[in-house]
Amino acid sequence: MTAATVPTSTTFDLGPARALSCRECGNETPLAAEYACVECFGPLEVAYDFGKITREDIEAGPRSIWRYRGLLPVPSDVDSHPNTQPGGTRLVEADRLAKALGLRKVWVKDDTGNPTHSFKDRVVGVALAAARELGFTVLACPSTGNLANAVAAAAARAGWRSVVLVPSSLERAKILMTAVYDGALIAVDGNYDDVNRLAQELAAEHEDWAFVNVNVRPYYAEGSKTLGYEVAEQLGWRLPDQIVVPIASGSQLTKVDKAFREFGQLGLVEEKPYRVFGAQATGCSPVSAAFKAGHDVVSPVRPDTIARSLAIGAPADGPYVLDAVRRTGGAIEDVTDEEVVEGIKLLARTEGIFAETAGGVTVATAKKLIATGQIDPDAETVLLITGDGLKTLDALGDTVGPRATVPPSAEAVLNALR
Ligand SMILES: *Cc1c(COP(=O)(O)O)cnc(C)c1O
Ligand SMILES: [Zn+2]
């Protein structure tokens, strides 16, 4: 089960990262391209020795995820290597959306503004930086789409080869937005879980391929912390009361929670209770189902939803999502594909932000959590909008379009507006 052991030296400069530690048994192993514990096969996670980090240090950094390099498993000169400079996206005060939802205060974290228009640029940025230090030369991934875009672009910018595996049914936009960077894009006849299995097999055979979400997953996953850090910094160095996070593998949700805890422990924000909520599409809702059933484990499902970027039927971080959500007093809900489209349209018409289907899942789930009394309408709420609507245009079908088609006359236009 362990990844190909590439270099075994312990002299890697991965900033504050100290070791890899097992999330199940706590066993520690030196920093390397490993992802499963040799004792119990549990997933490995980066463990740190943080130095003293102040708000001023962070504020003096670049307007990208690299301002948080002192909290990530990357070399301190990370930004001097060619990279796509992800992060630094806007946090929008969404008063009109708040009103429509019946909430007192809402912020939208608009991660459509990343280099390849989804939050995946964050995780790929960290994976590439760590992979370079670990001695890899090829960047690879299995992907539901957004990761493919981010890996192909980051590899192009860095002058690396890329190998990207996607299900052949992927949206056309996501295929084109990957292929244009001219890495090796392979469409596989199968769903994401098939593609993921294939990647595990290839990662074991090709020692020089860094599969960002397989053999360098512990490093990759840490990139999601930057979403949490940015939200807290942009709120004026404080934590929100509630945050709604979409779930695919579940990594992002657990790392946003980790980011909030780290900021508290490091004294960068005041520690306070906050609640983490998870959002899924009903057509692929294994974590939501487990939450509602009171289970600690997640039973795999076969995905069938327009929210393809979240369509992971066997989510690797499922149990850890359940832990984080239960520990913080949050909840997990799921919404139908019709509700997803309504969510996309609601965000667009109230805030002028066009999200992909995953964003529709977040907005629609927030709405459902409010309706069912699980979100407190008086508490400050952040919604994570993780991808751009241009990636999933087909999801809108003919639910939007011109109000009328008229001859070129002013009268006809005014008639149509009446
Ligand atoms: C990958 C992805 C997510 C969730 O990622 P996980 O960390 O796997 O849960 C959310 N939104 C979008 C748009 C994504 O592409
Ligand atoms: Zn273990």
Image: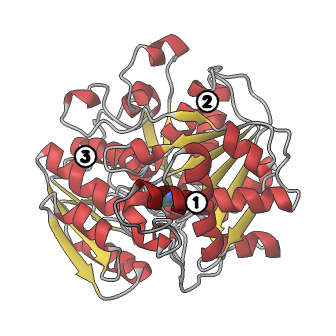
- Which image quadrant for residue 168? bottom left
- Dot in front, 3 or 1: 1
Q: Which residue is mark 2?
A: 232
Q: Which mark is residue 134?
A: 3
Q: Residues within 10 Å of mark 2 (few under 14, many from 20)?
A: some
- Which image quadrant for residue 81? top left
- Residue at disc 1, CB closer than 8 Å to ligand 1: no
Q: Residue at x 30, y 31 (%)?
A: 75
Q: Residue 211 appears at what percent x and percent y?
A: 30, 62
Q: Type of residue at label 2?
A: Ala
Q: CA distance from mark 2 to mark 3?
A: 31 Å
Asked whether the residues under the numbered discs 2 and 1 touch, taking CB atoms below 8 Å apart as contact, a structural biologist would say no
Quadrant of image for the N terminus: bottom left
Q: Is residue 74 above or below residue 409?
A: above
Q: Residue 376 appears at what percent x and percent y?
A: 85, 46
Q: CA distance from mark 2 to mark 1?
A: 27 Å
Q: Residues within 10 Å of mark 1 (few under 14, many from 20)?
A: many
Q: Residue 374 appears at what percent x and percent y?
A: 85, 56
Asked whether the residues under the numbered discs 2 and 3 touch, taking CB atoms below 8 Å apart as contact, a structural biologist would say no
Q: Is residue 158 above or below residue 342?
A: above
Dot placed on the residue nearer the N-terminal end, 2 or 3: 3
Q: Type of residue at label 1?
A: Lys
